[in-house]
Amino acid sequence: MTKKPLILVTNDDGINAPGIRALIEVINTIGDVVVVAPDSPQSGMGHAITINSTLYVWQINSDNEPQLEYCCSGTPADCVKLGVREILDRKPDLCVSGINHGSNSSINVIYSGTMSAAIEAGIEGIPAIGFSLLDYKWKANFEPCKPFVKTITENALKYGIPKDVVLNVNIPNVSKEQIKGIKICRQAKANWVEAFDKRQNPQGRDYYWLSGKFVNLDSGEDTDEWALENNYVSVVPTQFDLTAHKHIKTLNRWDLNAQLKH
């Protein structure tokens, strides 16, 4: 009898988010599932970890469900750390994060708690995937995502994910029939043009609401943004070594030690 893979499930929208419930449903058909997820929404937290306050984690009874579930007071990265170090009795075969309510394509990967959880798993040497649906609504329809989540997860387990790489998967907000397929892509060059809405509270103190517009600066047809705009699921292999290796030689031409010689 083949042993089922052990799969750690997490997210950044919180343990009760519809996205993670959809993900758990799919992953239960593939392996033995342990869920460790935040007790409240943690969107935009990036790779934050809790160091100045205590962390709490408690098991949730999931009646008639095969998975074990734990709720954590910390960030998505905290959830993975606690899951690996304190909850699981062995290293999981895979970590999946999501399904996020909203896009994590292009530069959004930097801010994403969903992807930071996957990256934290990758740092631990665990193959990992972050899934996101391009719909920010709480009651988003995750049904069209399920076959693509299943296919990508099963392929990741079968073929393996390259070392020191995690997969950033984004799914367009269209019907299953409208999705043309899955494309392996590069991250598009894009950014947010940000603005702050300045207001005053009743005591006369200034406060700000962050707003902005996402701008795609990349016309390439091999990017995640192009794939999503054309109704493909985008898969971007994402590395957490941020070194710009090709520029080391260029920077070594600087006279950085010249003054130290005098």
Image: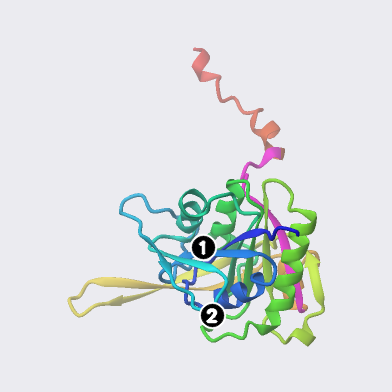
**Disc 1 marks which amino acid?**
Gly
Instruction: Give yes or no for contact between labels 1 and 2 (Cβ–Cβ under 8 Å).
Output: no
The magenta span reads: 231-245
Dot label at residue 113: 1
The residue that appears at 41% across and 71% down in the rendered structure is 40
In-image side of 136 versus 200 (left or right): right
Question: Which residue lies most toward the left here?
Answer: 203
Task: Please identify the quarter of the rendering in which residue 119 is found.
Answer: bottom right
Q: Give the vertical position of 59 relative to 197 (above or below).
A: above
Q: Residue furthest top?
A: 262
Q: What residue does disc 2 label?
A: 18
Q: Nearer the viewer, residue 251 or 118?
A: 118
For the N terminus, the image quarter is: bottom right
Q: Position of residue 19 (x, y in %)?
A: 57, 77
Foreground residue among 36 and 166: 36
User: Considering depth in this image, is 22 or 42 the residue closer to the camera?
Assistant: 22
Can residue 226 be seen in this snapshot?
Answer: no
Residue 38 appears left or right of 95: left
User: Is residue 230 shown to the viewer in this render?
Assistant: yes
Q: Which residue appears at 63% of the width and 44% of the height?
A: 241
Q: Magenta span has 240?
A: yes
Disc 2 element: helix
Is residue 124 shown left or right of residue 182? left
Residue 165 lies in the magenta-colored region? no
Residue 10, percent across and down? 54, 64
**Could you tell me how far apart the alpha carbons at marks 1 and 2 are, in whole angstroms?**
16 Å
Q: Residue at x 31, y 77 (%)?
A: 199
Residue 156 drawn at (x, y percent): 74, 59
Residue in the foreground of this view, choosing between 187 and 171: 171
Q: Quadrant of residue 20?
A: bottom right
Please tell me whether mark 1 or mark 2 is closer to you in this view: 2
Q: Residues within 10 Å of mark 1 (few under 14, many from 20)?
A: many
